[in-house]
């Protein structure tokens, strides 16, 4: 009997362990240390990011809904402005010089909804990478190590007149914890690179077309497909071998101006 009770207790303990592990998987806000995607940053806590990259060169916050920012030293932000605004509103800024191009990373955060302390846990929700001067699409992988696009021509890719959107990999359920979007739990979220051009992209896109900003964030392929008729135009993956073989369309035919005929 003693042995049976021991085996029963062991079985119950094992069962409770499995149930607890399963519960953690389905709790929306359960978050384990480490990034969600291969970019290496999305899903890290602020402490993990700073341990990885060191102290930021500056901290910035949006002055308005537009891309207008105020920049602070890390000391000023931590001592004063973080308390006046909020830790979540500050973006950690890191600046590098690579091959003559200034590459500026800005890491945006979201706060843990279940952490009601004065300093809630902050998770990296998106990365804004600015390039000065603008660079060709084909040069981006050499300047940004985190940008490793797939070469499959069928990989999901879209464009508008201002940006190119590339998806990579499969959906990650944990990414929902850093998405602040209506219906965030009703769709899947995948690593996405959105490459912007302030001056606009040409109608015939090539790897020489220039961009000046990249946003790395979780985005939904389902939502992109729903919007493609209005804002997302599906294209061939720009980093596939097939894309480079495309020929520009012939120039439009020039219509001759009719010349009036006059009587002799």
Image (tube, helix red, strand yellow):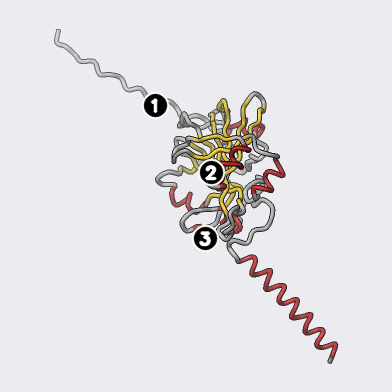
* Label 1: which secondary element: loop
**Which residue is under mark 1?**
252
Name the residue at the front extreme: 80
In the rendered view, would you say 248 is above or below 151?
A: above
Residue sitting nearer the eye, 234 or 74: 74
Per the rendering, the mark at residue 157 is: 2
Whether residue 174 is visible, yes or no, is yes
What crowding class fits label 3: few (fewer than 14 Cα within 10 Å), some (14-19), or many (20 or more)? some
In which quadrant of the rendered view does residue 150 lie?
top right
Q: Quadrant of the N terminus?
A: bottom right
In the rendered view, would you say 6 is above or below 176?
A: below
**Which residue is under mark 3?**
185
* Label 3: which secondary element: helix
Q: Position of residue 142 (x, y in %)?
A: 67, 32
Label 1 or label 2, whichever lies nearer to me, is 2
Q: Position of residue 234 (x, y in %)?
A: 48, 43
Tell me which label, 1 or 3, sits earlier in the chain.
Answer: 3
């Amino acid at each position: 009997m003693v042995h049976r009770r021991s085996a029963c207790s062991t079985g119950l303990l094992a069962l409770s362990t499995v149930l607890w592990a399963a519960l953690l998987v389905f709790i929306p806000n359960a978050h384990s240390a480490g990034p969600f995607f291969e970019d290496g940053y999305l899903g890290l806590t602020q402490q993990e990011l700073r341990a990885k990259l060191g102290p930021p060169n500056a901290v910035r916050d949006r002055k308005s809904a537009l891309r207008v920012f105020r920049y602070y030293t890390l000391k000023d932000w931590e001592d004063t402005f973080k308390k006046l605004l909020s830790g979540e509103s500050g973006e950690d800024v890191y600046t590098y010089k690579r091959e003559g191009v200034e590459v500026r990373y800005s890491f945006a955060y979201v706060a843990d909804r279940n952490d009601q302390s004065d300093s809630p846990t902050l998770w990296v929700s998106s990365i804004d990478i600015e390039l000065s001067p603008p660079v060709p699409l084909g040069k981006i992988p050499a300047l940004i190590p985190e940008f490793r696009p797939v070469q499959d021509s069928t990989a999901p890719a879209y464009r508008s007149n201002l940006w190119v959107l590339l998806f990579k990999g499969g959906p990650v359920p944990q990414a929902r914890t850093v998405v602040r979007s209506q219906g965030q739990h009703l769709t899947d979220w995948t690593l996405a690179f959105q490459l912007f051009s302030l001056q606009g992209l040409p109608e015939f896109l090539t790897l020489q077309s220039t961009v000046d900003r990249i946003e790395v964030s979780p985005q939904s392929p389902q939502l992109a497909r729903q919007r493609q008729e209005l804002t997302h135009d599906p294209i061939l993956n720009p980093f596939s071998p097939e894309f480079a073989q495309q020929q520009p369309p012939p120039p439009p035919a020039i219509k001759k101006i009719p010349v009036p005929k006059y009587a002799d």
